[in-house]
Image (cartoon, rainbow, N blue to C red):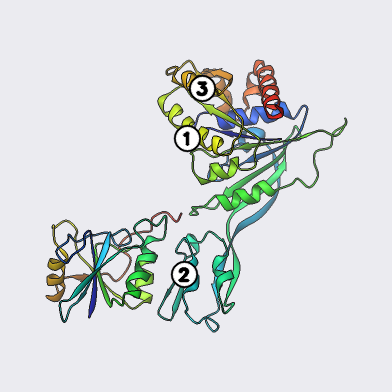
């Protein structure tokens, strides 16, 4: 399956970014073959609605699942509508995207069954 | 003539100045007062209007006809605010992100989008005892965008201007701006002819004065300054105004009796009648600058 991981850099060894809408980029990994690509997050500089934009972006990339640190209500709704599975990982462990991939494969990541926090301001 | 009273920093005395200015102006002009602080309007506490009408205002948000929609995604692409998302065969509309610009409706090739009013606040109107035509915008709790309410508020025209026994009076509009220096302040200044800055002689007062002064410069609006609580803090405001060629039109010293009168819902000129002359003079100087 195609798994998106929010990251701060340009490679699979880049640090995991626990922010979803404001992540620097997304690493898209094929969990079967291990091949990966990195895509800059177009929502990084959005004045508002970053979660919605990022969710649409990874849906367009064809991701079937996402790992990030938190999902706001609009990001959650958009990801759910796109049938993208949502997984959670802590951003405090100094992990790379490769570490997150390993944790995902071993089934150690919790799923987000609802938004993890209230929305930011609506402006 | 349209005068905006702005400050940047909150609590410097915008409403204190704007309400007294309105009362003094009402002696010679047909005054329209707009409380543009839609997040927390409070000029009514001082001008005591009889609020006779209330009207709901809002923005037009998109509603998608799921039968006609082909999920082409053009609406989501055109939306600058990500208020509409198309994922797979689903269209999501987030009303609280929508700015009501109508781009999605225009661009939809299937005409599948219609618009529906989303109420975000109200406009109250009425007359004050001295015959000032008064209106205030009030944003609903939980809303984040005041600008659409302000646009409607600025369009308001009193149905019947207060009757005067003498010759028809020249109209004068006073807009009490919200604090800060963001979009609602910009919208309040848009279309005005003069900005009166009310500040206090503190570093915070100066910092925010610089921000609102920059907005007025963008609009190329003549401006003047009222220093409230004069005598506290430092003289950095004086220095700044001298450098910027901003005239200081009035100084109001900090006085406990004034604070007590304001706290009981009196205006400055009602509580301290000696200010009536000072405010008349202030108004004359503003009018002279607008006409210059």
Residue ID at (52%, 52%): B145
What residue sits right under mark 2 in the picture?
Answer: B76
Q: Is residue A42 visible?
A: yes
- In the rendering, at what x and y percent does residue B70 appear? 50, 82
Q: Chain of mark 3?
A: B
Distance between the Cα atoms at labels 2 and 3? 47 Å
Residue A8 position by quadrant: bottom left
Q: Foreground: B184 or B275?
A: B184
User: What is the chain letter for disc 1?
Assistant: B
Quick one: label 2, few (<14), some, or many (20+) residues within 10 Å?
many
Residue A49 in the figure: left or right of residue A5:
right
Q: In the visual, does A93 lie left or right of B143?
A: left
The residue pinned by badge 1 equals B211
Q: Nearer the viewer, residue A50 or A10?
A: A10
Where is residue B138 shown, x and y percent of the image?
58, 48
Q: Tell me the tag on residue B109.
A: none
Determine whether the residue tagged by mark 3 lies in a helix, strand or loop.
helix
Q: Chain of mark 2?
A: B
> Marks 1 and 2, Cα distance to the nearest angstrom?
34 Å
Q: What residue would you read off at disc 3?
A: B241
Where, quadrant-wise, is the N terminus of chain B in this rendering? top right
């Amino acid at each position: 399956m195609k798994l998106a991981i929010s990251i701060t850099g340009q490679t699979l060894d880049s640090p995991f970014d626990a922010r979803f809408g404001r992540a620097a980029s997304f690493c898209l990994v094929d969990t079967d073959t291990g091949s990966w690509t990195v895509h800059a997050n177009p929502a990084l500089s959005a004045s508002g609605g970053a979660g919605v934009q990022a969710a649409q972006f990874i849906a367009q990339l064809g991701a079937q699942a996402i790992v990030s640190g938190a999902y706001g209500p609009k990001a959650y709704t958009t990801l759910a509508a796109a049938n993208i599975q949502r997984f959670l990982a802590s951003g405090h462990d100094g992990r790379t995207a490769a570490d997150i991939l390993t944790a995902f494969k071993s089934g150690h990541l919790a799923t987000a069954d609802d938004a993890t926090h209230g929305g930011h301001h609506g402006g | 003539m349209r005068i905006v009273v702005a400050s940047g920093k909150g609590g410097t005395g915008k409403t204190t100045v704007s309400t007294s200015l309105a009362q003094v102006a009402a002696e010679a002009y047909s005054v329209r007062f707009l409380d543009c602080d839609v997040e927390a309007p409070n000029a009514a506490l001082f001008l005591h209007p009889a609020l006779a009408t209330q009207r709901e205002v809002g923005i037009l948000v998109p509603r998608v006809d799921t039968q006609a929609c082909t999920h082409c995604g053009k609406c989501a692409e055109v939306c600058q605010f990500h208020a509409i998302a198309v994922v797979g065969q689903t269209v999501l509309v987030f009303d609280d992100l929508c700015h009501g610009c109508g781009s999605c409706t225009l661009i939809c090739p299937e005409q599948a989008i219609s618009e529906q009013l989303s109420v975000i606040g109200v406009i109250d109107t009425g007359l004050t005892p001295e015959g000032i035509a008064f209106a205030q915008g009030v944003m609903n709790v939980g809303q984040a965008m005041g600008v659409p309410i302000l646009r409607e508020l600025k369009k308001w025209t009193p149905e019947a201007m207060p009757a005067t026994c003498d010759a028809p009076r020249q109209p004068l509009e006073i807009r009490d701006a919200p604090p800060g220096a963001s979009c609602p302040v910009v919208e309040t200044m848009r279309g005005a002819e003069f900005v009166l800055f009310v500040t206090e002689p503190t570093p915070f007062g100066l910092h925010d004065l610089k921000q609102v002064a920059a907005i007025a410069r963008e609009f190329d609006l003549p401006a003047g300054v009222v220093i409230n609580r004069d005598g506290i803090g430092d003289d950095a405001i004086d220095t700044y105004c001298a450098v910027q060629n901003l005239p200081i039109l009035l100084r109001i010293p900090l006085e406990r009796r004034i604070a007590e009168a304001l706290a009981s819902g009196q205006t400055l000129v009602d509580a301290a009648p000696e200010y009536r002359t000072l405010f008349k003079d202030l108004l004359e100087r503003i009018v002279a600058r607008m006409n210059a």
